[in-house]
Amino acid sequence: MYSATALLSWGSLLGAALAACPFADPSFLKEKRDEPAPAAPSGQFLTEFEVDDNKGFLTSDVGGPIEDQNSLRAGARGSTLLEDFIFRQKIQHFDHERVPERAVHARGAGAFGTFKSYGDWSNITAASFLSAPGKETPVFVRFSTVTGSRGSADTARDVHGFATRFYTDEGNFDIVGNNIPVFFIQDAIQFPDLIHAVKPSPDNEIPQAATAHDSAWDFFSQQASTMHTLFWAMAGSGIPRSYRHMDGFGVHAFRFVRDDGSTKLIKWHWKTQQGKASLVWEEAQVLAGKNADAHRQDLFDAIESGNGPSWELAVQVVDEDKALAFGFDLLDPTKLIPEELAPLQKLGVMTLTANPTNYFAETEQIMFQPGHIVRGIDFTEDPLLQGRIFSYLDTQLNRHGGPNFEQLPINRPVNTPIHNNNRDGAGQNFIHKNKFPYTPNSLNNGFPAQANQTTGRGFFTAPGRATTGNLVRALSPTFDDHWTQPRLFYNSLTPVEQQFLINAMRFEASHLTSDQVKQKVLAQLNRVSNDVAKRVAVALGLPAPVPDPTFYHDNVTQGISIFNSTLPTVATLRVGVLASTKSADSLQQAAALKQRLAQDKVVVTVVGETIAEGVDMTYSSADATAFDGIVVAAGAEALFGAQAKASPLFPTGRPGQILLDGFRWGKPVGALGSASKALEDVGVPTANATGVFTGTEVDGFAKDLDGGLAVFKVRLFLSRDCFGCFR
Ligand code: HDE
């Protein structure tokens, strides 16, 4: 009977052991049983497992002080000896450092934080972490892309994982969600097919982290259930500005269960408080090469600077008897519930406040499972969810190599003792004293005792759940419509977003080599929208398909568009100020702008020819992808346009390229005083151009620029060169 917090750091255990003669009295193994850990701020609940190497001698894994710079040899020029246990232990540990990466969602980043409940929600759920206003629960969140391997670029176009663990006082609860509210398939048995189709080709392992290839679209075009998620991924949600600028969704319908056993169907939503924003595709592609860690870095830096992101947790709540009332089946994970039909009810807010101390120990080893649920929450019969409940535990057994991964510090529940009759296995951390690990037992007085709904606040499956029916290897006919909701999605986008979606589809489809796949793709798109199909067809040099109107409609819904609103905050957005070390004025002005924008928590990087006083980054390493807005400081204009001299310090034309790329990718750009010449020199229009700012006085200029940042880039396209390339 050991608590989840039973382990001390090995260092202190061994120290105690040596001091107290362990054979005579192994009392050093008895500490910390069943004692709840003291409440601690986010991430801090793991500090007892941290190893501080700031003092002490190097030791072997079993504690003896060692020197490991030289292996043991038979003479200075002789062979290394098998006897050298120090060499073998070090090399063998290294040889086993890697564990299998996640089969999907291998690339990701995580952080600790706190969830705070807005109220007592016992009217809808018995979940303890939602039981009181202000109640705080530690969380760990991991964001990810799906398709790429662990070393792939963050800005690949993809669905993004948004997995949250709540370390509740009644055990761990995970919402293993995505940033898109629907999924590609309806039955878990198809998951291996989906993933085999989107992963790189088995012969040459190309392309990495991309769906622009035949096998992905071969699958998509024959599996129409993929259309809805595909439309989302081809729009802004596939290339978010950062993990902080995206929403999250539980995707499936789950159940809330009250203390009296009554239930409601719910869908989980995480609403970003940073506002939604996305990259532009060309920018995302460039960024993948310039900074493959862009999203990871963004999250880390935001938290380090004290601007940890936050999301509100909301649910859509639906009566059990309304599962089919909206014209689709709530058990179908390819459907969202339009917000007009079931409003979002906000339950609380989560803020991320601490970065992991060790990526492998925490972010890599956290094992989320849809099956980690707590009292007050239950599954539904969604056939995708049902399969997931099996898959995660199974894949984690493979990743960890044994059943004890839940004992890893990041996976243990906090303040919740673990008592059960599970025993042994590789890496067993607990030292179970109970000699009668079975139920029922009388020899251990019946302990651990059974908890149930009335005794011990036991977890319970909603007592009213019933399932009947003949065995059938088929989906319900209520899952059949694959086209109405992708069309609802498309209708709900702004024209600029629609154009981006078309551009993305064109990009993907033009990578296809198989004529039959191209034809099938067009046929599928045409069932959603003749407009989309025609615009993709023209890029493929194929005839426009005639309308296939069975599922056409003009309905729109809210909560879909990313570009129809401004950001609630510009804090942590990044502005590059292009200055020149040859102009003291430009550096002075850059410093003034930096100081002024710091009031709004906008992060300014001053760029110059070399690192110098007041210069943070050189033109040789800077480019437009590093910034959300770009400004030229007065005095730096000599670096732009035809008159700019080539410099050995950076690639020819780099300052102008930064400015022009920023403009082309829809970022606010501007110039102070005489530097407005730089705008003209590189071809950025200054008259009546939305999102192009000029001025002489720093304060007013900064205010305008803030406004441009809040609009965020894509709306600026309305008045920019891409507008001309519509359709
Ligand atoms: Fe996953 N998924 N998935 N998935 N999934 C995994 O579990 C799987 C699905 C999601 O940051 C794996 O531990 C099946 C939907 C996230 O650690 C694996 C099916 C949603 C993460 C697995 C789905 C997700 C995973 C790989 C279809 C959104 C990363 C490693 C039935 C609601 C969690 C692991 C993290 C990870 C299986 C579909 C989200 C292989 C079989 C739908 C965010 O078990």
Image (tube, rainbow, N blue to C red):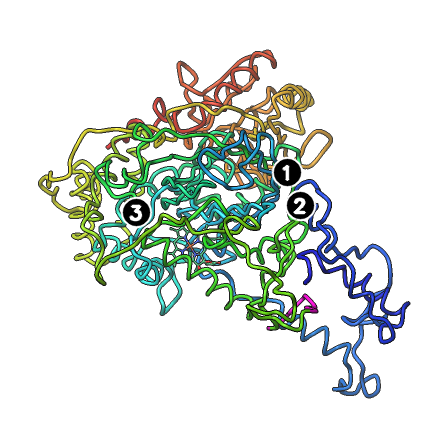
Query: Is 456 included in the stretch rendered in magenta?
Result: no
User: Where on the picture, by quarter, is residue 89?
Assistant: bottom right
Q: Give the range drawn in magenta.
A: 425-433
Outermost residue, left direction?
Answer: 546
Q: Is 470 in front, or is 662?
A: 470
Are the residues at dot 2 and dot 3 in contact (C-beta closer than 8 Å)? no
> Which amino acid type is marked by label 1?
Thr
Does the stretch in magenta take in 429?
yes
Residue type (three-letter) at the residue carrying disc 2: Gly
Residue that mark 3 sits on: 331
Residue at the image position 52 percent from the left and 57 percent from the top: 151
Distance from Cα at disc 3 to Cα at disc 1: 35 Å
Graded by Cα atoms within 10 Å as few (under 14), some (14 to 19) or many (20 or more), the crowding at tag 3 reads many
Among numbered discs 2 and 3, the one appearing first in the sequence: 2
Residue 623: image x %, image y %? 53, 38
Ligand 1 shown in quarter: bottom left
Q: Mark 2: give few (<14), some (14-19) or many (20+) Cα within 10 Å.
A: many
| Labels 2 & 1 near each other (Cβ < 8 A) | yes
In the rendered image, residue 277, in percent from the top left (x then y), is placed at 44, 32
SS label for mark 1? strand
What residue is shown with label 2? 43
Q: Type of residue at label 3? A: Leu
Residue located 46% across and 44% down the image? 286
The tag earlier along the polypeptide, 2 or 1, is: 2
Q: Quadrant of residue 717?
A: top left
Q: Quarter holding the N terminus?
A: bottom right
Asked if residue 59 is positioned above or below residue 300 in the image, the reply reads below
